[in-house]
Image (cartoon, rainbow, N blue to C red):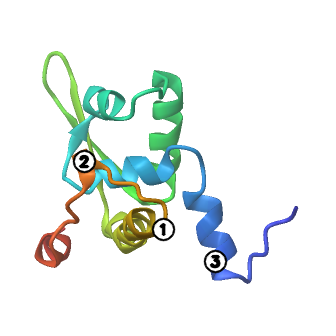
Amino acid sequence: MALDESCPVCMTADIVCGKWTLLLVRDLAAGCSRFCELERSLAGISPRTLSLRLRALEEEGIVERHTFPEVPPRVEYALTAKGCALLPIIDDMRAYGERWLGAECAEHAEPRPATALAAA
């Protein structure tokens, strides 16, 4: 099925509906994370898939990659302002899951305060 480029819902879904994408954004909402931390928090994701998803989110301007000139090299990932704009979607999905699906994600149950979002 062709993507309707005039529809903002279709365009957004094209970016965020990839497997692991929203979970990566959810995990990065807490702040900067290293590759190994993201890999640990997303049980079941392969290193290759994580790398591909992070690269795709970087290309979309949702995630930024910070490389530190250290030995061994250190790389951290963080949400951009464009990435932070997705957090209300994740908060709404969490509320939907709790209300309609009886689900609760203990690790990520607390939404970020609005002041933390504004500072990001």
**At x 57% / y 44%, what residue is drawn?**
19
User: In the image, is residue 109 above or below residue 20?
Assistant: below
Work out whether mark 2 precedes mark 3 in sequence or the reverse, and give the earlier one.
3
Q: Would you name the residue on which mark 2 appears?
A: 106
The quarter of the picture where the N terminus appears is: bottom right
Foreground pick, 76 / 26: 26
The quarter of the picture where the C terminus appears is: bottom left
Q: Is residue 116 left or right of residue 56?
A: left
Q: Would you name the residue on which mark 3 appears?
A: 9
Q: Amino acid at mark 1?
A: Trp
Q: Is residue 7 left or right of residue 103?
A: right
> Which of the 4 image quadrants contains residue 107?
top left
Q: Nearer the viewer, mark 2 or mark 3?
A: 2
Identity of the residue furthest to the top in this view: 72
Work out whether mark 1 precedes mark 2 in sequence or the reverse, and give the earlier one.
1
Foreground pick, 68 / 8: 8
Give the SS element for disc 3: helix
User: In the image, is residue 49 above or below residue 84?
Assistant: above
Work out whether mark 3 precedes mark 1 in sequence or the reverse, and give the earlier one.
3
Q: Would you name the residue on which mark 1 appears?
A: 100
The x, y position of residue 49, in whole percent, is 53, 30
**At x 35% / y 29%, what residue is drawn?**
39
Q: Nearer the viewer, mark 1 or mark 2?
A: 1
The residues bearing labels 1 and 2 have C-alpha atoms spaced at a distance of 17 Å
Give the SS element for disc 1: helix
Mark drawn on residue 82: none
Q: Amino acid at mark 2?
A: Ala
The x, y position of residue 114, in whole percent, is 17, 77
